[in-house]
Image (cartoon, rainbow, N blue to C red):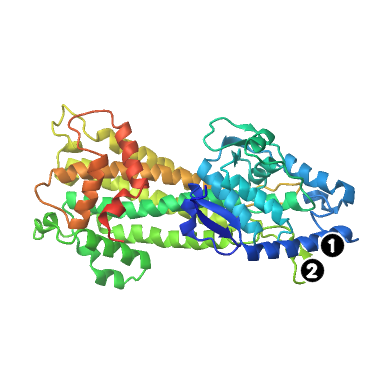
Amino acid sequence: MSARRRLRLDGASLGAADFEPIARGEVRLELAREARAEVERSRAVVDAALAGEESAYGVNTGFGRFARVRISPDQVRELQANLVRSHGAGVGAPLPDEVVRLTLAFRANALACGRSGIRASTIERLLELYNRDLLPWIPGQGSVGASGDLAPLAHLAQVLIGEGRARGAGEREWRAGGEALRAAGLEPIVLEAKEGLSLINGVQASSALLADAFSRARRLFAAADIIAAMTLEALLGSLVPFDPRIHAARPHPGQAVVAERFRALLDGSAILDSHRDCGRVQDAYSLRCIPQVHGAGRDALDFVERTLVTEVNSATDNPLVFAEEGEIISCGNFHGAPIGYAADLLGIVVADLATISERRIERLVNPDLSGLPAFLSRREGLESGYMMAQVTAASLASENKTLAHPASVDTVPTSAGTEDHVSMSTFAARKAREIVANAERIAGIELLVALDALELRRPLASGAPLERAVAAARERLPRVEGDRSLSEEIEEAARVVAGGVLGDAARIG
């Protein structure tokens, strides 16, 4: 653990580049000194309110519909523990370890903003869970993104008080929360005024799901350009639609980036040179419009990144504590609308990226469109080649179209009408992550088929960057003759896409 890079949380400085190291457990999280000072100042305001006569929501009152019920000082600890217990009503499969690590970090960073009134020692215990890789059991269903991810974050908080379930580093079985704490050398904490509420307000589980999907989508878009360039060459397509003048005439940033990447990938291509005067006027949209589709997706991901970075560096409590004025103010910063909208957008653009990829797969295996053997079979009729690979891609693309229906347009009032508009951000982010997984497989199928199609254009070579990507892919996906079960090859190709292998090899930025 001592060898891990230190990442100090101050409530303001997390960036998108931090998401993957956090998710993989590669950093050690610490509360920044300046953040600790702000946290302690806001805690003093909560202590003063507890000693005063006025009602302060969540400090000396009940929650939701019970906000009008005054709680006596001797019941404050019980109130906070009851909140964490009662709100742990999630169901379904637990969130993946990567997402749980991000949830822990994002929640701690939100508290480090110094607007929650929580004790610094409670934040540090949260960080200890992360640093010791003691991961709470957080079921993935049961949140509407209203007053934040109440159920998921309550399951997280239960472990702090020795309840719920958790799993230590390298363990496969879940333990009772108290037992898991003891095994890690930790004791349960007693929640003080407002601390239970502070631990569960905000959409950090939604944000964690989206951050994981976003990181994978970035790599997917980078790989998609390289794979599509292979397909363009295999189909003897034209590089003319990637002319920089075209994209200067419609200056969407992502569009220009994709066109530039294609020009770099295909620079010096003998395959392209071989058919410059072939007489074909235009390619199909799935080739000619790659910059417009891939590029628009890149621009959408830029929006998702800005939204995520803003959200994970925000104070999302209700109420918020402003130590400068000594005020505690009720608000709605917990609402998941920003994350819900961003997650739905990510799902839509990734689903569309997968759709255009599936259309290129169809062109590669359809002899009427490609001029290549049917399904790239070397013995047509006797062998089926990649016939069923395209069917699998079509199935996943269709599934994605249904999953891409936005969740954030829905709302179901909860909490006796108090929470009368909700965001559905958790479901939006959860299905965005599922869409990305399907799209990785579709891109993997295009990679498999494009690699074999390029073999049929040999001995002509691609541009140098693309040849490097082809060689790297072939190390993981060697050429196999004849019919065989394709399932494991597709899964391995998806791992090549997800792992950034192609971009690392091509080295075009």
At a point 67% along the width and 62% down the height, the residue shown is 36
Q: Position of residue 266 (x, y in %)?
A: 19, 59
Residue to which mark 2 is pinned:
326
**Mark 1 belongs to which amino acid?**
Ala
> Does residue 409 appear in this view?
no
Q: Choose the circle earlier in sequence order: 2 or 1.
A: 1
Q: Position of residue 143 (x, y in %)?
A: 63, 45
Q: Position of residue 75 (x, y in %)?
A: 86, 46
Q: Secondary structure at mark 1?
A: helix
At a point 57% along the width and 47% down the height, the residue shown is 131
**Mark 2 belongs to which amino acid?**
Gly
- Estimate the spatial distance between the alpha carbons at disc 2 and disc 1, rounded to whole Å: 9 Å
Among the 4 quarters of the image, the one containing residue 452: top left
Residue to which mark 1 is pinned:
48
Q: For the residue carrying disc 1, how many other residues have a C-alpha within 10 Å: few (<14), some (14-19), or many (20+)?
A: few
Horizontal side of residue 177 vs 457, given as left or right: right
> Does residue 124 appear in this view?
yes
Q: For the residue carrying disc 2, how many other residues have a C-alpha within 10 Å: few (<14), some (14-19), or many (20+)?
A: some
At a point 35% along the width and 71% down the height, the residue shown is 251
Horizontal side of residue 477 vs 395, given as left or right: left
